Image (cartoon, rainbow, N blue to C red):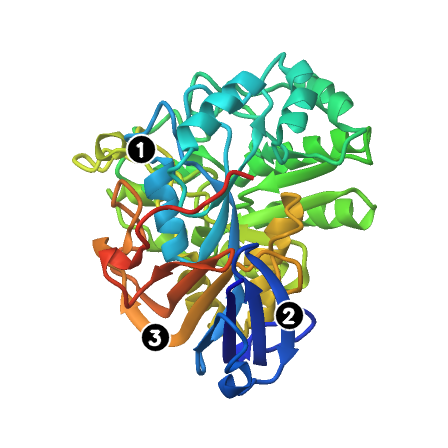
Amino acid sequence: MQTLVLISNNVQLPGNEDPCPATIEIQCDTGKIIRVKPGKTDRQEYHGRGTVEVWDLGDLIVLPGLVDAHVHLNEPGRTDFEGFNTGTRAAVAGGVTTVIDMPLCSIPPTTTTSNLEVKRQAALGQCWSDVAFWGGVIPHNQHDLLPLIDAGVKGFKCFLIESGVEEFPHVTSTDVKAAMEQLAPTSSVLLFHAELHSNSSGVSETITPNPRSYDTFLRSRPDSLEVSAIDLIISLNKQHPSLRTHIVHLSSATALPLIKDAKASGLLLTVETCFHYLCFTASSVPAGRPEFKCLPPIRSAENKEHLWTALMDGSIDFIVSDHAPCVASFKYFDTGDFMNAWAGIGGLGLGLSVLWTEGRKRGVTFSQIVKWLSTGPAVHAGLPSKGGIEVRKDADFVIFDPNSEFTVTTDDLRFKNKSSPYQGMVLKGRVEKTILRGQLVWDRSRGRGGFQEAPLGNLL
């Protein structure tokens, strides 16, 4: 039985505000943490104790593996956009040891057990990280939801506005009520793309809008779409207060008072935001650069700061990538047309560095980072073996150098379509190693781009 021992001056343990010296023992055949000891154990103490490998990581930060609860892997059906192999390679290179795949953008979508099985079969043998799946709520599939729970999905996502793909239509309040009636007796969670369907574009009819202008696109998706949707979600949730509900990729800080009141009332409502909303502002988006287009949109600098405040005070629960790339032709790079470009940002694997770069300016601690990027999303997705450095949890770790600095180039974009608004940014902090269930799956100092010889990810 092989044991791997990690020793570092800076391990982020549960209950500690800051990293501290610690020693972690891992049973490699089970992939589980078997012992966590405060302080650095002298490696000589392990001499003669069987097959033991000791890694002294010095001052590098040891965090639990990250959990990205909002990723579009698109396979099967749109594998020219992304796939299990390339998407999860990008994940582990950024310290993400678990991703939860969204139900749409693949063909078929994850709306029935047979469709889920098609997706699972496509994923077999391809995943470098562990992968779990969200199911989807579309009109009239409420009777598919409980079988999907039995088949292993971690919850369900729906859209209150057009999703952008015809095989995943948006739902009405009647559809939501039908889904809630099915899910209320369960421990599952219902996720909402929270923009409310409207016949109004928000762009003035009296002028000819410039499709290369980010402001034209921003005006087409005003804050009011998010506020109206979240108001409806809360009112429907009150009819089934035992049901967990969740707002994906919150963009508009205008909706925060509604969210705070709902939480204070006892509703089981949680909220995520995205790295790009915490990093970019509308005024910083250049004209004709649709790699910045996402839904809901990146908003003002003031809005960004309100999101940061809500994150710090707990009104926003955690952060995700919402990695949603596409082929170059769908982004209209040749014309810079925001209005017709695919809405989705490529950024899987860069999140920890982006968050550290922005967060350190605001006094963010590694304890908070673990809550937002690991523990919070693991609890949200019902993954009790993930999200912390504790005995009996999976031995998933990210080894992070907080002082390293790098400029993002295409070499840092390990997903399939190498376009990202983060290109050219100077980021602080870099992932050095990623460990999945006790196995070194990515190492910056290793050949083959840092990857091991074959993927080891499980389907959860």
Q: Position of residue 382 (x, y in %)?
A: 66, 44
Q: Position of residue 409 (x, y in %)?
A: 23, 58
The label nearer to you, 2 versus 1, is: 2
Residue behind mark 1: 81
Please tell me how crowded label 1 is: few (under 14), some (14-19), or many (20+) other residues with Cα within 10 Å: many
120, 237: nearer the viewer = 120
Location of the N terminus by quadrant is: bottom right
Residue behind mark 2: 35
Residue behind mark 3: 404
Quadrant in the picture for residue 191: top right
Q: Is residue 82 above or below residue 136?
A: below
Answer whether residue 201 is visible to the viewer in this image.
Answer: no
The label nearer to you, 2 versus 3, is: 2
| Residue at image point 54% right, 49% down | 273
Labels 2 and 3: the sequence-earlier one: 2
Labels 2 and 3 touching (C-beta < 8 A): no
